[in-house]
Image (cartoon, rainbow, N blue to C red):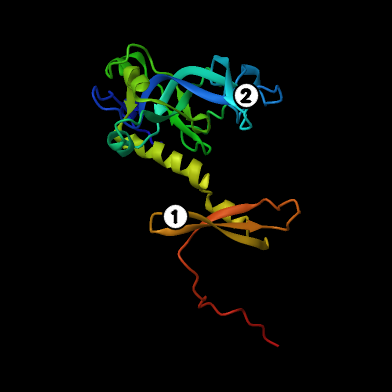
Amino acid sequence: MTDTPRATFYRRHSRDRLSQGDIALSEVVQVRSASGSESGGPGPAEAAAADLPYLGAYADHELPVSNGAGGEAIRILRVWTTYAIVLSQNCEVEWANPSDSRVAIAPIVTREQWPEAPWDLLPRTPPPGYVYLPPLELAEATALGVEHPWPESVVVLASSSTTTRRIIKARRLLSLSVGELSRLQDAVARFYGVRGFADLPALQATIGKPIREVVETGQVISGPSSLVKVYFGSDDGPDADDEVTVSYWGVRPSTRRPPTTSS
């Protein structure tokens, strides 16, 4: 994120068109086990941590489902009513089948809700899965048609779900500016594709580690270039899970000669 004026990160939403980056009040859901053995979060405020957001108040509803063997099982449908952002690409929204009501969304969590988050990192180097949204003072918000200040907040991609066009379109508040959509798109691609891009020191830290496996991911980035996972260390050593994802265009013989020693 740059030092651009905060108000330029947002725009008024289009009255007629639903778009990626639209922010609206919506329901976000998670289907959970009713066995009692499910992990608590996301849910209660006491479960929140630096890497587990508190999404706000929620309600649990019992949901009978088929158990696949002719019987019935009970699931818990956990529902949050919160602000969320549209993730679906504009082409998906505009050119979808007329009977397709689906819209992908992700919840938005405020700093007040989730003080445990790394707010010192989120504005400029957010961890994978988060998109920082700067606050708006009342005057800035009013200029965009919003009647109250907009809080400092963050999009939580790991809790994304689907809703319907009608629900989102009727309760929109504002939208990301066209120039800021690339941040949202980049965060989605990183989180669901390569998780994140490390800096040079992180890559240099792999020097000297034995490569134990190279695996194609089946994913491609612009270029085009295939993405390959490189695993380091022994199969069961302390660094067995170390890995990097690299873009791969091919291998060519090195023109560098090996060092020589004089007798």
Q: Which residue is under mark 1?
A: 220
Circles 2 and 1 in contact, beta carbons < 8 Å: no
Q: Give the residue pinned by disc 2.
A: 72
Q: Position of residue 102 (x, y in %)?
A: 39, 30
Q: Quadrant of the N terminus?
A: top left
Q: Nearer the viewer, residue 129 or 118?
A: 129
Rendered image quadrant of residue 26: top left
Q: Is residue 155 above or below residue 138?
A: below
What amino acid does circle 2 point to? Answer: Glu
Q: Residue at x 53, y 28 (%)?
A: 119
Q: Between 241 and 27, which is closer to the camera in this rendering?
A: 27
Kindly give the residue lying farthest to the bottom in the view shown: 263
Q: Give the residue type at disc 1.
A: Val
Residue 169 image position (x, y, % from top left): 32, 21
Secondary structure at numbered mark 2: strand
Q: Residue extending furthest top? A: 147
Residue 116 visible within the image = no
What quarter of the picture does the C terminus occupy? bottom right
Secondary-structure class at tag 1: strand
User: Which percent across, then down, holds residue 40?
Assistant: 66, 23
Residue 159 picture location, percent across and down: 52, 29
User: In the image as oriented, which residue stretches furthest toward the left?
Assistant: 16
99 lies above or below 255: above
